Amino acid sequence: MKLKMTSKNIKITICLFLSLAFLAGQSLAAGIKPKIEVGLSFGLRTLNNSELKDIYGQGTNFFPSVSLIWKGLMIGGGYEAGFKKDGLLGIYQEPAELTVKGGEIFAGYQLRLKNIAPYIKVGVGFYSYKQVVDSEYVSDYPVDGNKTGLIVAGGLKYFPLKKLFISAEVKYGGLKVKPYDTEVDLGGLRLNGGLGLSF
Amino acid sequence: MKIQTEKRAESLLLFLKKKRRSILVLLFIIIALEAFSGVVAGEGRKLSMAPVNKAFLEYISTPSKVLHYTAEGHPLGLIPSPRDLSYLRTGSIPRAKVVGTYPDSYDLRILNKVTPVRNQGSCGSCWAFATYGSLESFLMPAEPRDFSEEHLINNHGFDYGPCYGGTLDMATAYLARWGGPVNETDDPYVSGNGYPAAKHVQEVMMIPPRSGPSDNNQLKQAIMDYGALYTDMVWDDSSYNSTNKAYYNPGNTGGGHAVAIVGWDDNFDAAKFNTAPPGNGAFIVKNSWGPSWGDHGYFYVSYYDAYFARQDVSGVVKAENPGKYVVNYQYDPLGLIYNLGYGVDTAWMANVFQAQSSLPVEAVGFYTSSTDNYYEVYIYVDVAPGQPRSGQLKSTKSGFINSLGYFTVELDNPVALTTGQYFSVVLKLRTVGYNFPIPAEGRIDGYTSAAVSNPGMCLVSEDGVNWELITEIYDLDNCLKAFAGLTPIYPPINLRLALLENNFIFFKEKINRLSWAANPANGTNIVSHKIYRKANNESTYSLLATVGGNQYSFDDRGLKVPGNYSYQVTTVDEYERESDPVTVSASPQIPVKTEKTKAYRTKVATKNLVNSK
């Protein structure tokens, strides 16, 4: 699956997010209280770029988030961090470190069936990326930038207690960057599991 | 016709009968003279030794040697040399005719060709300071150096204590055997010893004593050509005018002192001296009594001084980089002590050496004792004992040296050796007007008791055919050195340039990779390679990096435009010699132009060219 961060996609995502926000606002105005869910998940994070994958390998991430859910409609945000990997780069196998992190906003739909709740969501990630190479020869080539990317995710929540849930989520985020002449896809799949509370 | 002949024969017999007694007396005188001079048919001349300086003999026989001091307490450390230089003043050798036009005044200080004035303190070491005053001046202004007088006075090898005086001969011996000069930083004044020579002195040009107040051209020419001159004087306190810093000794006795002449002033007023000399003119002289003495350490000596540069030789000490010759084959570490000869001004001498390494013999060093010297040098290898001209003749050189002193003659054809091989250096030397051409080193109690002869290695000959071991006649060694130099140093071979990209995923670092191979012709240890670079739009190379002698590649990293540079690589050996460069060039790589990427790539290339290193 490829998600291209074109201006059209961004516009669609923002419209979707604003529509859901508008609906939520209308519901609140009508006196219907939404549920608030806070969660923390942790899991694997892959890299789409095969060269980077060879150098840095698979990583991990953790993702604290908060969502508003009203009649199955969901909006929320979170912060993905924890992807920080060391590797050896280039002809001289010089030490390097790659970091990718950033915030996300998303909107989606969650179907509550007794004590389980499958859901899907789409959103936008606002990521920062940085590669630091321990070499005096590449100081003129800093890799330290910001880029937005689309995300698509789906998962399942299990409520063993009324307010406590256990989640499993598959998320894909695209993040193509091009600080110099080579385009690099920092996106990848996240396979997370976590815990959360629903109020 | 027949009758006339018979009459003539009869008259001749009659004449012989009448004068028989006179003829017999005449024949006796002729035979006696021939026998006395040692040239009776069938016998060679006998080797004899030049007279030793009487002043030296008096000095050496004095039980307690006490230095003279000036009234201000400065020690006067110039002592007599064993060489009797009176022949230089008798007119028996040719006087060099130096005809030239010289400026009225000349001052090496203005030309930045003197080093700062030093202070010998309470030590009788003026001769060491005067020697280095000359040598340091010779190297100025291109190479400011400060050599260690301390090392010289502590390590000259003669019997005198460090502060009990010396001579130019002693300094020459120390320098010619490469005992020095040592850097002052290695052995500062008042300290230890044991440091390598920072320079190799291969020539000490000596100028005969002045014959009179106007005999100054040789000194002036030498100062202009080479720098400050070592010279001698007799110090008498009453002859020094401390107001005008002017010195004129009309003939008063005093202590010997060595100084360096750095210039002259033909118009220096005679009235400035304590006793007015017959005319104007003075030498500008660098002393070694510190910068607070005299005119910032300098003073002015009248041309009419009775002793200044008139008793002993003056000298120019020249030096060269120590990498030119690296082995000094010699049996005369204490230098020229005696002169020998066969009663004529030509003689042969030879030294046999055993090769310490395979480095080729490139030069020969010896002393000359006249102002006109003709030499012939022969190098033989695989010589038989006692026969220095046996074996194979490998190199010859002949020439003329128009000066006294110690000289090095470079061979046109260096002689390759194998370690352990015996080779001989044979020298035929004619010292015009002086019948003791053979310079020799030997023992004199109280002066050179450390001298050790080397039996079987030093030979002398009257004719170059019949040789005799010098040790069978005198306990001496020839002052004849051989210098092994270095084989040429060659640049690396197979220099190549490869254009690489180092993949950092987000960008690719451009690298020019140089690789080369060792040149098998190099015979010395290679300690480093130097890499020079210039951009293709530049005109000169600049040093980029120095890598080890065992490293045969270098990556020029961090480039923004691959290629675009030319490189030179040189080889540097253990003697700090650097080879000629070998060059490789590369043109910038032009990115592939496709319709889709043309604009972008052109933009990047332009930016990179501006920012390229």
Image (spheres, coloured by chain):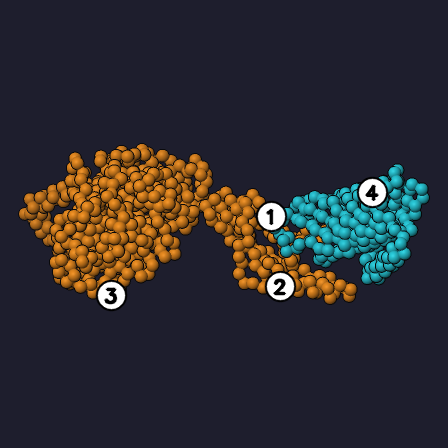
Chain colours: A cyan, B orange
Q: Secondary structure at mark 2?
A: helix
On the same chain, marks 1 and 4? The answer is no
Q: Residue at x 19, y 42 (%)?
A: B67
Q: Residue at x 24, y 38 (%)?
A: B160
Describe the element under mark 4 as helix, strand or loop.
Answer: strand
Front-lying residue, B367 or A150? A150
- Mark 4 neighbour class, 10 Å CA radius: few under 14, some 14 to 19, many 20 or more: many
> How many numbered tags mark residues here?
4
Calculate the distance from the C-alpha at mark 3 to the C-alpha at mark 2: 58 Å
Q: Specify the subunit that label 1 lies on.
A: B
- Pointer 2 residue: B610
Q: What residue sits 25% from the left and 64% below the top?
A: B105
In the rendered image, residue B531, in percent from the top left (x then y), is placed at 55, 52
Q: Secondary structure at mark 1?
A: strand
Closer to viewer: mark 2 or mark 1: 2
Q: Work out whether residue B491 or residue B162 is closer to the camera in this orientation and state it.
A: B162
* Chain identifier of the residue bearing label 3 in the image: B
Q: Earlier in the sequence, mark 2 or mark 1?
A: 1
- N-terminal of the pair, mark 3 or mark 2, is 3
Q: Which mark is residue A196?
A: 4
Please tell me whether mark 3 sits on a helix, a strand or a loop. Answer: loop
Q: Are marks 3 and 2 in contact (CB under 8 Å)?
A: no
Residue A89: percent from the left, percent from the top?
69, 46
Q: Are marks 4 and 2 in contact (CB under 8 Å)?
A: no
**Between marks 4 and 2, how big is the CA–CA gap?**
56 Å
